[in-house]
Image (cartoon, grey):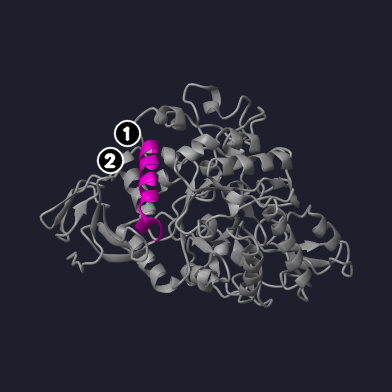
Amino acid sequence: MNTQHIFGRQGQDWWRGAVIYQIYPRSFMDSNGDGIGDLPGIIDKLDYIASLNVDAIWISPFFTSPMKDFGYDVADYRGVDPIFGTLDDFDRLVEAAHARGLKVTIDQVLSHTSDLHPWFAESRTNRDNPKADWYVWADAKADGSPPTNWQSVFGGSAWQWDTRRCQYYLHNFLVSQPDLNFRNPQVVDAILDEVRFWLDRGVDGFRLDAINFCTHGELVDNPPRSSSAEGFLGVRPDNPYGYQLHLHDKTQPENLAFLEKLRALLDEYPGSTSVGEVGDDDSLNVMAAYTQGGKRLHMAYSFDLLGERHDPEFLHHTLTAMEAKIGDGWPCWALGNHDVPRLATRWKAQDDPTRLRLYLAFLLTQRGSVCLYQGEELGLPEAELTLEQLVDPAGITFWPAYKGRDGCRTPHPWCADTRHGDFSQGEPWLPVPETHLGLAMGHQDLAPDSLLNAYRAFLAFRREHVALKKGEVRYHPVRDEVLCLERHHPAREPNERLLVALNFSDAPRTLPAPRQARPLDDAPALVNGVWADGKVRLPPCGIAIACCPAQEEITWDV
């Protein structure tokens, strides 16, 4: 299939300010009763996704895979794993999504493959086959130990001995995920061909997994970190990965040259886009470098807002630091995904719909694009699972200090009164928690004041205000736990300036505000702050948004 569809190529900067709904296909909707979500299941729920007022979907890996890391170990970049459906199903999904005004982005796992990929099967046979240098191979040290002290994200050495070649191969993640050698031009060309395959099928963009892991540096030891710290992908202090400063095993300057080749390919398909996942000790600077100049990634996101800390001072520091670094680049923000505990639990808002509304307003008023993980719109908490129920290799390895990622990957609850929440007619691959059934889509859909309908309303509101989608941002100092910012888009009509005040306190707050501020007629119901007489009055966890004449200078004494 070679689709140059009209919809997918219109509005070349559609991604700028877009809200992208992340689908974890194993857990979204099962159409055939085998307990695993699939592509036809996604098609069945596209009307629901469109009703959220998002702009695009991001589908986590559905490629042919042994599923050691649940699809992030790809054995065939061009194949759909049979548990998810067929290529014809994917083509139908793209067509159905576009018919509903939804762009389609898919995961691409470029830094590594499965050890069952034919490339690796050939590479490991000996040291002089045509693909011998397609992966990162290195001799042992004189004493037989690994070439360097580099650690795997999932625990233990990042090097695995292979008896066929009597060499070590690099794996930054699982042993079964060998790293490709991006210093080999043949590898780069082959990877770009895999990306082109999906562009030709009408895909609108790519979420690029662990994109800063594509290149490695010289084979020298990483220095120790002064103290272990929680870092990338839920790495905890009890994981030796956190003991090192990762100066040589990832985020190398050579990666920029690869990103420029990737961008040149994407530019052949006007309207296509890319969002890179960045996990690094200096993630904000990497995000800036990877998105500046219009010649690398379109946008990138990091794990800075995916940890536990969420006080307004921390948020203010992170956002202002990003603004100071990003230049003409473009950020993408997320508060949850398939790798971290659910937002409602991680940010202490379980059973607190008022605070969850505050977090949605915070996310959707920042400058940048947004990734919204399935179930956030329902306020799902982290699922509590037993060791026997876990399937995530990271959780099994580090139990009980770290319970892995299964708690955020349980099936999407569609109906509270149906077995397994109407996710599947069979036994699900992970259980549907009882705590999720009361938050099921069907229940919230009919409740006007539900969190689901609050998301719908605010996303519709965001769409109507160009200042929120594409405008500039200015932050004011945090005062009394209130985060205040302005959004302004001077180049578009209507020329508007929006003022936003977000109260992270459990107490009401009254602050000085510009006298020119006026309430918005179209503000959704969750916007509950009052602007009057040069003040803004906010209830606990309150949200206030006002408009102000863009042509006038304003003072906001906070």
3 is higher (above) or lower (below) than 495:
above
As for residue 469 lying within the magenta part, the answer is: yes
As for residue 315 lying within the magenta part, the answer is: no
Q: Which mark is residue 502?
A: none
With 446 as the anchor, is 396 left or right in this view? right
Residue plotted at (16% across, 59% down): 516
Q: Position of residue 84 (x, y in %)?
A: 68, 39
- Badge 2 element: loop
Residue that carries the numbered disc 2 in the rendered image: 525
Between 434 and 389, the residue placed more toward the observer is 434
Span shown in magenta: 452-470
Q: Which quarter of the figure is the C terminus placed in?
A: bottom left
Residue plotted at (49% across, 71% down): 288
Going by the numbered disc 1, the residue's amino acid type is Asp
Q: Is residue 301 visible?
A: yes
54 is higher (above) or lower (below) than 470:
above
Q: Are marks 2 and 1 in contact (CB under 8 Å)?
A: yes
- Main secondary structure of the magenta stretch: helix
Q: How many marks?
A: 2
Residue that carries the numbered disc 1 in the rendered image: 449
Q: Position of residue 173 (x, y in %)?
A: 65, 58
